[in-house]
Image: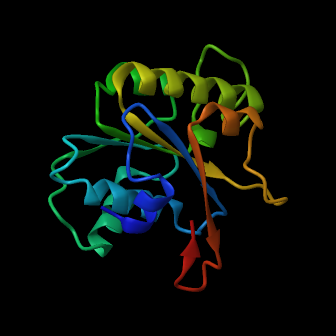
Amino acid sequence: GIGELDRVLGGGLVPGSVVLLAGEPGIGKSTLLTQLALETVGTVPTVLYVCGEESPEQIKMRIMRMTVKDVSHLSFMPTTDVDEVIASAGKPALMIVDSIQTMATLDLTGMAGSVGQIRECAFRLLNYAKETGTVVFLVGHITKEGAIAGPKILEHLVDTVLYLEGDCRHEFRIL
């Protein structure tokens, strides 16, 4: 339902696909994915928004600033534990993980955001997407050098990599 997003995705959402949306802090990644979640009303039965960075209250405030439609299909899971997400998610049609750099598993040592944690969490979410047919969007951050934070394999694990670019002080962005 978002023309520009549908266009870069080759026509829209593909069941079981994993999409990495990367961009600088404050560029609008979370806002774009919140808009996507809201636009799916009537076409997608359930959307799960995994809140690794922001609280559900912060996301709800963003929703209130937008033109609000029915949000009964939208649920929030405030956690950074990837295993909890997979165990509790069920089979939503769409899952937004904001962000992959905040996710971790207790099966590995190291903090969230480390190379091993990012790789393993992304791999587990990829397997989950393929097994359930859930479309999974992963929010990724950009380093000061302009690369996606984390291991390069993250970009190879996902089906699609999107970059949101622009100047956060201006209205227009490039996806």
Q: Is residue 141 left or right of residue 77?
A: right
Q: Is residue 21 left or right of residue 63?
A: right
Front residue of 49/152: it is 152
Residue 36 picture quarter: bottom left
* Residue drawn at 40 percent across, 40 percent down: 78
Q: Is residue 105 left or right of residue 150?
A: left
Residue 39 location, x and y as percent?
27, 60
- In the image shown, does 8 or 103 lie closer to the viewer? 8
Q: Residue at x 50, y 20 (%)?
A: 127
Q: Kindly indicate the quadrant of the structure image that contains residue 100.
A: top right
Residue 115 percent coordinates (x, y)? 76, 32
Asked whether, in this view, residue 107 is left or right of residue 44, the answer is: right
- Placement of the N terminus among the 4 image quadrants: bottom left
Q: Residue at x 73, y 32 (%)?
A: 153
Quadrant that contains the C terminus? bottom right
Does 82 sit above or below residue 158? Answer: above
